[in-house]
Image (cartoon, rainbow, N blue to C red):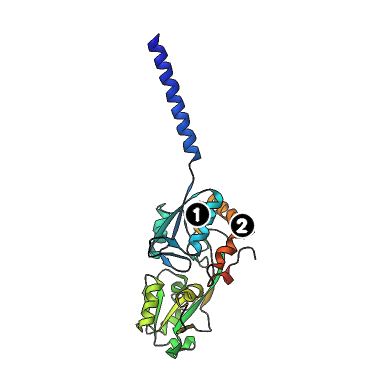
Amino acid sequence: MKKGIALLLASVMLLSLAGCGGAAATSEKRVFKHGFDLDYPPYSYINEDGTMGGFDVELAQAVCEHLGWEYQAVPFNWDAKDAELNAGSCDCIWSGFTINGREDDYTWSKPYSDNTQMIMVKKDSGIKTLKDLAGKTVGVQTATSAYDLLNDEEGQAELCKSFASLEVYETYTIAFNDLKAGAIDAIAIDVTSGQFLMSGSEEYTFLDEMLGSEQYAIGFRKEDTELRDTVNKALDDLVADGTYAKIGEKYPEIKDFLCLGK
C-alpha cells in the first residue's frame, strides 16, 4: 500500500513538473535575430566597446521592446547577407537595404527611408560633374545598390566604363580612408552614409548630379510573410507614438529621408 502511494505521489510530482515546464516554454520570449552590416553607418555598426549602434539597430530594438521580443544582434560582412539569411542565422536583413532591383528576391516590409546615390569627392579635386570622372579611380562598397548601378547596362554602366578603374571595397569606411589618403578620386555612395562619413569635415562634397534614387526596407525570407506583417504593424505603432521620429532625430543624416507615416 505504501509503495502504491509513493508511486502515485511520484506520478503527481512528475506531472506537476511537466506542467511547469510547459508553462515556462510557452512564456519564453521570441528571439528576433536582426541581421545587419557590421560597418554601415549611420544605419548599423559596431562601436569600439563592442556595443551595437545605428538607426536600424535602434529601430529594430524598439520593435522588439514594443512586441515583447528578445533582441539578438547578428552582424556580418555585407556580401554574406544572403547566406546568413538562408541559413537561418538571422530573421531578416535590416541595414540600409535597398528594395529597388530586388523586389522579387525577398518578402519586404514597407519602406521606412528614402535615399539617393551620389558621388563623393574632395572639394579641391577639380571634379565637378560626372563627366569629370573619366580617367579617375572610383571606389564603391561591394554588393550595394551603388555597385549594382555602376554595373547595370540600364543604370550607370556607361559612366563606369569611363573610369580608369572601379575599386570595390568591403566597407565604405575603408573606401573613405582611401579617399582621404588620395588612393582613389571619388566614391559612389548613398547620400546618408556619405554625409555621416564626412560629418565634421569641410574637405568633401557631393557632385550635384545623382546616380539614382532608392528606398530602404527590411528584407525577410519569402515565406516569412507573417513575421513581416507583425513587424510592419509594430513600425506603424512606433510611428504613431513618436518613437520612429525620436530615433531619427539622433541621426541628422537620416531624419529628412524618413518616409513612414508620410
Task: Tell me the amino acid under the disc marked 1.
Answer: Lys
Residue in front for this viewpoint, 155 or 188: 188
Residue 260: in sight, yes or no? Answer: yes
Q: What x and y, as percent, mark residue 136?
A: 39, 86
Which residue in the rendered view is the most extreme toward the top? 1
- Few, some or many residues within 10 Å of mark 2 (<14, 14–19, 20+): some
Answer with left or right where residue 67 lies relative to residue 39. Answer: right
- Point out the frontmost of discs 2 and 1: 2
Work out whether 43 lies above or below 222: below
Q: Quadrant of residue 255?
A: bottom right
Q: What x and y, as percent, mark residue 106?
A: 50, 58
Task: Tell me the amino acid under the disc marked 2.
Answer: Asp
Instruction: Return the disc, 2 or 1, that comes first in the chain's sequence.
Output: 1
Q: What x and y, as percent, mark residue 59?
A: 53, 60
Q: Pointer 2: what residue? A: 236
Quadrant occupied by the N terminus: top left
Q: Secondary structure at mark 2?
A: helix
Please tell me how many numbered marks the rendered image carries.
2
Which residue is rendered at x = 39% and y = 81% of the image?
A: 179
Work out whether 252 lies above or below 225: below
Which residue in the rendered view is the most extreme toward the bottom? 126
Answer with left or right where residue 257 lies relative to residue 130. Answer: right
Q: Pointer 1: what residue? A: 222
Which residue is rendered at x = 40% and y = 57% of the image?
A: 84
Alpha carbon distance from label 2 to label 1: 21 Å
Which residue is rendered at x = 35% and y = 82% of the image?
A: 181
